[in-house]
Amino acid sequence: MTPVIDVHAHVFRGRDIPLKGYLLSRTYPEWYIRLLAPILFTVIETAIRGESHGWFVDLVKQIAFTYTGKNYRNWADILSQGDMEEITRRMFSAFQKDRIELSVPLMVDFEYGFKHSRRLQPIVEQIDAVYRDVVLPFKGRVHPFAPFDPTRELAYRAGLPGPGEPDGGPREKYSSLDSAKEAVRNKGFIGIKVYNPLGYRPFGNTVVDTQRRSIFRRNGMTRYEVFTGAQYDEVLSELYRYCEREEVPITGHCTHDGIEAYPRASFDFASPRYWRAVLERYPRLHVNLAHFGWSRPEEYLDVPRQPFFDRPWQAFRRRVAGAPGRASDLPSGAEPTVHWVREVAGMLARYPNLYADVAHHPVMDDRNIPKYQEAFTAMCREFPGVIQQRLLFGIDWHVIARVEHYEEFMERYARVLAGGKIFTKNEMRDFMGWNALRFLGILPPSRKVKSRWSKNWKRLKTFYRKNRLRQPKWFREASAYKGE
């Protein structure tokens, strides 16, 4: 049997994120939304954090759901839960028929990326809560990725106050790097999550100093403007060296949208091409580009438009204005020549330890199934044998709870790859589980390579023994795997 492994999930609560700050960072075409935003978003944040109830709160929530769509009610209900264990139980219940043996929640540290409105639970306490309320109770069915935020790390090293504190207030108490290391060493975490759209590139941050500093000014965090792109590169390099040496995989957000520091910030900070320098410098590092860089089902087969008269204007904004939201997808100033999904596919062929997951692809819409089938058919033809060995299954719970029929995600993706006769039976087994275990370092990187990237495997074995947990079935199967 092949274990089914979901490499992309979330179990955070509304109280763990700066929700109002995120909502205020968006742009809204309706004048009345902009006018009412401070009050409206305060009430929404309070309600979703589970801190207030009553007719007025219910009315505001009803207005919000009318604006966003009814399926957001389901997501808001999940976010309002105070118990991470209950959120995790709801996840396994939603996908019970899929028989997922291992789920990998990706923790994200959002605190430095948005305007601070309410005090959040400290990120180290969030890690402890996931360890206590999720990892241990589920006995090997859940092993998360710890969050890393280079801004928190720099604030800690500089002795600056954390977000929400006044100048001269209490210093940032937590090293982001040390917290992530501790989670991996002793708390059953098996990787690290970085979230570039919050305001930093994987490497080469000097060219986006202006954009990043504008985020801090807008959010009232001007004290963090002192950090330079070179300092960001330095702490990120420390992370990469540690992960390569200790065989800890990294997942990075890689799609055109998501929770961004400002609209279209992903184009400034999260393009897959910005990972090239990292993969060249650290060739043994295991990296997953989450969402495969995919924004539209037909994107792989599209030819990007390159209007001649756009170029001078874009160059002007890059070199003179330097304004956030400029969507400069390249560090060099050249026009993009490929869409992100095609860029990622080419990188998979070049870098043997690079992977990509399919989380939140819109396969619940029947109209998109043939589009994805056409794209994957062309991709596998152009990169033979590559996609089948580097594609990871992931769902994106609980974010995907906003989508109608999200419980059918696995079934719909099977219709794309197996139903379209794009993947063989063995390749589907790799996609559903074995590829994930290669990415996580628990299996050899390929059937041709016998040596295992084994430190994660050893850490988990020790973790089960110390906590008196029976090794889960997926771990035993991985330990016995000899290739096929």
Image: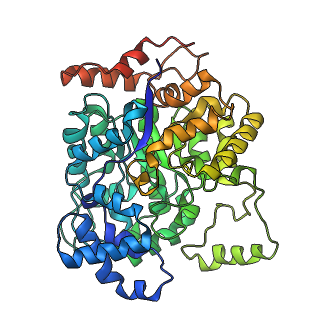
> Is residue 472 depicted above or below 114 in this figure?
above
Tell me what residue is drawn at x 42 percent, y 85 percent.
Answer: 34
The picture quadrant where one finds residue 40 is: bottom left
Residue situated in front as seen by the camera: 323 or 258: 258
> Is residue 441 depicted above or below 305 in this figure?
above
The picture quadrant where one finds residue 8 is: top left
Residue situated in front as seen by the camera: 56 or 339: 56
> Is residue 62 depicted above or below 407 in this figure?
below
> Is residue 471 depicted above or below 172 in this figure?
above
**Could you tell me residue 266's position as x and y percent?**
54, 61
Residue situated in front as seen by the camera: 376 or 68: 68
Q: Is residue 376 left or right of residue 5?
A: right
**Could you tell me residue 372's position as x and y percent?**
66, 45
Residue situated in front as seen by the camera: 450 or 74: 74
Tell me what residue is drawn at x 39 percent, y 42 percent.
Answer: 192
Total numbered circles = 0
The extreme right residue here reads 308
Q: Which image quarter holds the C terminus?
A: top right
Q: Is residue 187 left or right of residue 27?
A: left
**Could you tell me residue 133's position as x and y percent?**
20, 41
Tell me what residue is drawn at x 40 percent, y 73 percent.
Answer: 66
**Could you tell me residue 30's position as x and y percent?**
48, 84
Q: Is residue 452 visible?
A: yes
Q: Is residue 164 visible?
A: no
| Scheme of image coloration | rainbow
